Amino acid sequence: MLTIQNLKSKIAQSPYQAYVYSYPHKTAYRPLTPPIYLPELWTQQDRQALFLYIHIPFCEMRCGFCNLFTTVSHNEDFISQYVRTLQRQAQRMKAVLGDASFARFAIGGGTPTQLPIQHLATVLDIAENTMGAKLQEIPISVEVSPETATEEKLKLLRSHSVDRVSIGVQSFIESEVLATQRRQSNTQVEAALTRIKQAGFPTLNIDLIYGLPGQTVNTWLQSIHTALRFQPEEIYLYPLYVRPLTGLGRTDKEWDDIRLACYRQGRSLLLSQGYTQVSMRMFRQGGQGGQGSNFSTPSPLSTPSPLSPPSPLSPSSPVYCCQADGMIGLGCGARSYTNTLHYSNEYAVGAKGISEILQAYIQTPDELFEYAHYGFQLDAEEQRRRYILLSLLSDEGLNFVDYRLRFASEVDADFPELSELLTLSLAIKDEDSLHLTEFGIERSDTIGAWLFSEKVQELMQGYELK
């Protein structure tokens, strides 16, 4: 049971306990016994506006803050095996889905452009000719890195109608980047950004991180100012989270917590430059946000800021998100979402665990791709919690009419404890919706974790990280 006492307690603590970006968290996934037959599962879903996601688990280096499913231990032969397996999985999934269409497509990782260009071309071919995604007609996003955003690869992506490129810069201060065990020079980064702009992608997204070792508020603002020189359509501002089994997580360093000051000043700078705030982390150039897009309600307390998860927007929305239901994930680290089941391969952070899972993926017989073996089944309550969490932690807010239409019940009756957000000045309510205040948006991770069910919390606490 959610109580005002435990929410008060959570708000008083550091909000950097856990990074909330979806629900349920992947550490709540467990083996599915018996495995679930995917043709039966997807037959019950609307398959006319799906999101296709392809995961490429390769990087040129392992950043000290990274806990993603990715490896730097690969060669041409292993990459070829992985892409062939991706093709086999796609062929089976196309048969599973039958008459389906895609409204979005994204390639993530890892670093997709780490692939040799012929393999990157094959991945695009898998999406278009195997899965049947009409690349000329839908939004497409690809993640790149400064080292791999070559002119040749950018030209290939643009020729296949990729309209959004996301690049993880993290900082334009070389000493801060080096402290995260990441190798890149400003000359290299700025050359990559120049190539991306010259290639003519409609949307450039730049990722930056605040709270890095040795960073100050002034150097943080310096990084944002440098990013703004390239006029990115989107900027994501991520607080640093130091997590187990990552490079930074293995150190004994004590972290100076300047994240709230960095967030507030970074937010103020971007708003002054005409950006709209979509969530705690996402800022978009121009456009009309929702009622919470400027989050102007004063904040009564002063505790560090968290990061909000993405908005549960429809596939036709221009805002990029990859956590909505109706997502088909291909590749070893991809997750798939239906309204009743989230499923994936197992998850690891350590090199040994990742290697074992990758080898098992490559050796998977074709017929086993028709089954979900690992995941989380969402009952009616979990579906409601997911909807509330993803709605509330974006500028869209929680719309009561939409909730009623979807679940045939009233949100106030299902979750009366949401009124506690009002009591603590974390949200404001009007006739049709509930929106977080500026104070609430700063604490999105805390509020998100507060909304987790007891079942999910217990599974997460019992998870053994590999």
Image (tube, rainbow, N blue to C red):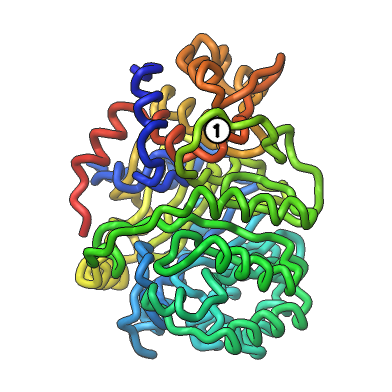
Of 343 and 200, nearer the camera is: 200
Q: Quadrant of the N terminus?
A: top left
Image: 446 above or below 206: above
Q: Which residue is mark 1?
A: 440
* Image-quadrant location for residue 398: top right
Q: Residue at x 65, y 90 (%)?
A: 152
Q: Quadrant of residue 233?
A: bottom right
Where is residue 401? Give x, y as percent: 68, 19
Q: Is residue 344 left or right of 169 when viewed as pictured?
A: left
**195 w.r.t. 165: above or below:** below
Q: Which residue is more in the foreground, 425 or 99?
A: 425
**Percent position (x, y) of residue 275?**
75, 53
- The outermost residue toward the top is 413
Q: How many marks?
A: 1
Residue at x-position 46% and y-position 62%: 330
Question: Is residue 361 at all visible to an observer of this figure?
Answer: yes
In this rendering, would 308 be left or right of 20? right
Please say whether residue 130 is visible from this viewpoint.
no
Q: Which secondary structure, mark 1?
A: helix
The residue at 35%/89% (across/down) is: 75
Quadrant (top left, top right, bottom left, bottom right) of the C terminus: bottom left
* Residue at 47% over, 46% down: 21
**In the picture provided, is 204 more to the left or to the right than 130?**
right
Q: Residues within 10 Å of mark 1 (few under 14, many from 20)?
A: many
Q: Is residue 329 left or right of residue 398?
A: left
Tell me if residue 305 comes above or below residue 107 in the rendering: above
Q: Nearer the viewer, residue 262 or 104?
A: 262
Q: Position of residue 64 (x, y in %)?
A: 35, 70
User: Mark 1 is on which residue type?
Assistant: Gly
